[in-house]
Image (spheres, helix red, strand yellow):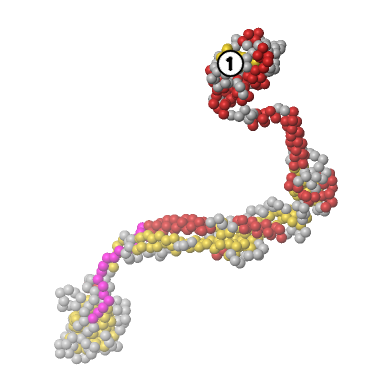
């Protein structure tokens, strides 16, 4: 049942819109408009009312006896009635009544019209306030005009034409731009076996020379380390006797006057022992005095021996057995010796030719004196010496340091090489280690604690593997005839170090295998075979490329009776056909 909404004379269009918003539970609304009312007397009012009605999905009818309101309502599409009784009867006006008819109280009445279609919802309009509805113009929005044009025959025709054009462009793109082709030109190739020997030399001496590469001479700084060795043994040194010359004279025995002759014979020198001293002091002849004959004059006036009383001077050394550790003997000292108490190797005689020892024993006393001091004597002493365990410990320390320093310089050598490779042959030659070890003490050697230093350096030659492989490749290319070219991806073999040493000198070798084929320039033919029939392209390429033995064409993603229109979609590659 329709809800009647009576419009006050002072109501505006915004009041009517607000009443529609508040009638939430009623779908059918009837506005009863007074003859002297302000609302619904302009097209704008009716357009706003219509839009808001659709936005809230309402069915609105107009009841008014005013011809102006009736005319505007009918043109806006509202069911319009002159009175409430006609509303109850369902008889609406089909056209605007004339003023005379209205005055007579009659109206043009037609058959009940068909119910108007349910207005489409306009949720955007429903969210607007009545003041916003009044402020907007009555003309349709841009979206509304576009929607109206879209559903018009002209719009539909335009869309159909545009879709067909896009489809046609897509088909052309698929047929002419999307396809690609790969053309494989088979060229018969020939095998090359090459045993390459490469010499390495210092940089600057190998530029542009075949089979010669630059190398780098590496020399590490000296790595050093010290260690100590101390003697743990002791040794007693015997005393060293003092040496000098003695002069002799004799006294006593009743034989004063004539000279006597003192003769030494045999290898055992006699010992001249002092008979008067509380401590026995003795001397023995040196080897120079053995077997000699010495003239002994009488002592004169109580004076001791002198160069005049003994010819020549007797070379002697102090007897360490008697002297103990006394050592040197000062000058101007005098001793006495009785030959009769000595060994038979010393004899006194009146003549030098026929010595006669008997008769003088115990009757003659020999005086001895040293005008010059005796020197060179040393007392017995104890000194430190190195034992076998000391030397063994020193050797172990040295070996450990040698090993550590060797590892250190080898690491330094690799760091210096960087990306290059240190050359070492199969025997391990190539790295030269210089180990400088100190001289160790010997067993029994006297000495003090010694600080010894070990020094190690390393030298080698380094080369670049990529440079070596490039040299092998260049050598392989040199074996290709002038009208041919080496095919891609040859087997360059394994680089082997034949000989290596320090200073940048080395020898490398490799067994390379490759294939060469007649030189063919395929690049210009990409543009020449565009849009050509595949069979014709095959015939054309075989005719234009004398070195080609076969031509195979692959198309993607599907085969067409022509090659791609764009040269960029065509790839021409050479395929080796090995002999």
Q: Of 109 and 181, which appears nearest the observer?
A: 109
Q: Residue furthest bottom?
A: 257
Where is residue 237 drawn, in percent x and y? 28, 68
Does the magenta portion include 379? yes
Q: Please identify the quadrant where the N terminus is shown.
A: top right
The x and y percentages for residue 7 are 56, 16
Query: Range of the magenta residues?
Result: 373-391
Question: Is 155 on the left-hand or right-hand side of 327?
Answer: right
Residue visible at 32% across and 61% down in the picture: 231
Image quadrant in which you'd find residue 230: bottom left
Write down the residue under mark 1. 34
Residue in the image at 57% along x and 63% along y: 504
Q: Quadrant of residue 170?
A: top right
Give the quadrant of residue 28: top right
Q: Is residue 552 left or right of residue 280?
A: right
Residue occupying image coordinates x 31% and y 79%: 287
215 above or below 288?
above
Q: Position of residue 211 (x, y in %)?
A: 66, 62
């Amino acid at each position: 049942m329709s809800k009647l909404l009576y419009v006050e004379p002072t109501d505006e269009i915004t009041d009517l819109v607000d009443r529609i918003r508040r009638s939430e539970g009623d779908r059918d609304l009837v506005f009863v408009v007074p003859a002297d009312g302000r609302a619904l007397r302009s097209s704008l009012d009716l357009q706003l009312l219509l839009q808001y009605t659709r936005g809230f999905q309402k069915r609105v009818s107009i009841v008014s006896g005013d011809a102006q309101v009736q005319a505007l309502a009918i043109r806006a599409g509202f069911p319009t009635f002159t009175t409430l009784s006609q509303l109850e009867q369902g008889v609406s006006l089909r056209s605007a009544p004339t003023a005379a008819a209205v005055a007579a109280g009659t109206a043009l009445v037609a058959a009940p019209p068909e119910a108007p279609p349910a207005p489409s919802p306009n949720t955007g309009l429903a969210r607007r306030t009545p003041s916003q509805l009044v402020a907007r113009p009555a003309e349709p929005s841009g979206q509304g005009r576009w929607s109206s044009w879209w559903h018009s025959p002209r719009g539909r025709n335009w869309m159909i034409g545009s879709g067909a054009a896009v489809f046609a462009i897509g088909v052309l793109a698929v047929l002419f731009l999307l396809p690609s082709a790969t053309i494989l030109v088979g060229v018969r190739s020939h095998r090359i076996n090459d045993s390459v020997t490469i010499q390495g030399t210092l940089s600057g001496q190998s530029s542009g020379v075949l089979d010669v590469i630059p190398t780098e001479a590496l020399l590490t700084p000296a790595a050093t380390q010290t260690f100590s060795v101390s003697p743990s043994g002791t040794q007693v040194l015997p005393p060293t006797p003092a040496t000098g010359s003695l002069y002799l004279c004799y006294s006593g025995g009743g034989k004063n006057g004539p000279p006597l002759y003192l003769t030494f014979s045999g290898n055992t020198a006699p010992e001249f022992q002092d008979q008067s001293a509380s401590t026995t002091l003795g001397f023995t002849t040196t080897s120079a005095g053995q077997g000699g004959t010495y003239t002994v004059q009488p002592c004169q006036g109580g004076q001791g021996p002198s160069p005049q009383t003994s010819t020549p001077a007797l070379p002697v050394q102090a007897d360490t057995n008697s002297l103990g550790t006394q050592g040197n003997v000062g000058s101007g000292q005098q001793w006495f010796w009785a030959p009769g108490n000595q060994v038979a190797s010393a004899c006194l005689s009146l003549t030098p030719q026929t010595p006669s020892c008997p008769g003088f024993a115990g009757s003659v006393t020999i005086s001895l004196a040293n005008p010059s001091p005796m020197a060179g004597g040393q007392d017995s002493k104890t000194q430190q010496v190195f034992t076998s365990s000391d030397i063994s410990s020193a050797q172990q320390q040295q070996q450990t340091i040698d090993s550590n320093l060797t590892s250190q310089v080898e690491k330094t050598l690799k760091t210096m090489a960087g990306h290059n490779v240190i050359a070492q042959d199969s025997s391990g030659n190539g790295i030269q280690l210089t180990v400088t070890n100190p001289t160790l003490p010997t067993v029994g050697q006297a000495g003090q604690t010694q600080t010894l230093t070990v020094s190690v350096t390393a030298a080698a030659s380094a080369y670049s593997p990529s440079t070596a492989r490039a040299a092998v490749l260049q050598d392989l290319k040199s074996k290709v005839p002038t009208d041919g070219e080496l095919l891609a991806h040859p087997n360059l073999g394994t680089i082997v170090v034949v000989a290596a040493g320090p200073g940048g000198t080395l020898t490398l070798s490799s067994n390379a295998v490759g294939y060469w084929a007649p030189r063919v320039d395929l690049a210009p033919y990409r543009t020449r075979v565009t849009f050509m029939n595949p069979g014709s392209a095959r015939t054309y390429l075989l005719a234009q490329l004398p070195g080609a033995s076969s031509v195979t064409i692959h198309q993607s993603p599907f085969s067409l009776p022509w090659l791609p229109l764009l040269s960029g979609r065509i790839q021409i590659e050479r395929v080796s056909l090995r002999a």
